[in-house]
């Protein structure tokens, strides 16, 4: 299996007002410091959800994920 180099998060639905200007798509380059984000990626990705919430300071209601 090929090693994942990026996580592409699309169709992000934020629990925030539209005026917050949050992205609908985020690309995360995977390295040794953040490879924990791949945990649960095939199911409910708790780590990824927490990471995005921490990064943008809003909770997430849903998203799609693609790994490359």
Image: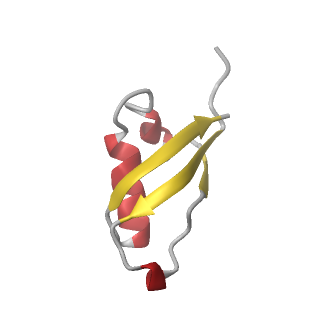
Which residue shows up at 43% across the image and 66% down it?
Answer: 55
Which residue shows up at 68% across the image and 34% down it?
Answer: 68
Quadrant of the rendered image containing residue 11: bottom right
Placement of 66 over or under 11, stated as above or below: above
Q: Position of residue 26 (x, y in %)?
A: 59, 57
**Depth check: 18 or 44 in front?**
18
Q: Position of residue 38 (x, y in %)?
A: 46, 35
Placement of 55 over or under 17, stated as above or below: above
Q: Position of residue 37 (x, y in %)?
A: 44, 41
Which residue shows up at 46% across the image and 49% down it?
Answer: 63
Q: Position of residue 60 (x, y in %)?
A: 35, 59
Which residue is outermost to the top?
A: 1
Which residue shows up at 38% across the image and 79% down it?
Answer: 17
Q: Is residue 32 visible?
A: no
**Depth check: 9 or 33 in front?**
9
How is the protein colored in the picture? secondary structure
Q: Is residue 62 visible?
A: yes
Quadrant of the rendered image containing residue 46: top left
Which residue is outermost to the bottom?
A: 19
Q: Across the whole image, how many numbered discs are drawn on residues?
A: 0
Placement of 51 over or under 39, stated as above or below: below
User: Is the N terminus in the top left, top right, bottom left or bottom right quadrant?
Assistant: top right
**Depth check: 41 or 3 in front?**
41
Quadrant of the rendered image containing residue 7: top right
Placement of 2 over or under 12, stated as above or below: above
């Amino acid at each position: 299996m090929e090693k994942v180099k990026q996580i592409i998060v699309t169709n992000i639905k934020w629990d925030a007002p539209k005026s917050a200007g949050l992205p609908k798509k985020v690309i995360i380059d995977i390295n040794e410091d953040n490879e924990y984000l791949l945990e649960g990626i095939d199911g409910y990705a708790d780590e990824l959800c927490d990471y995005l919430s921490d990064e943008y300071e809003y909770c997430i209601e849903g998203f799609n994920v693609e790994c490359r």
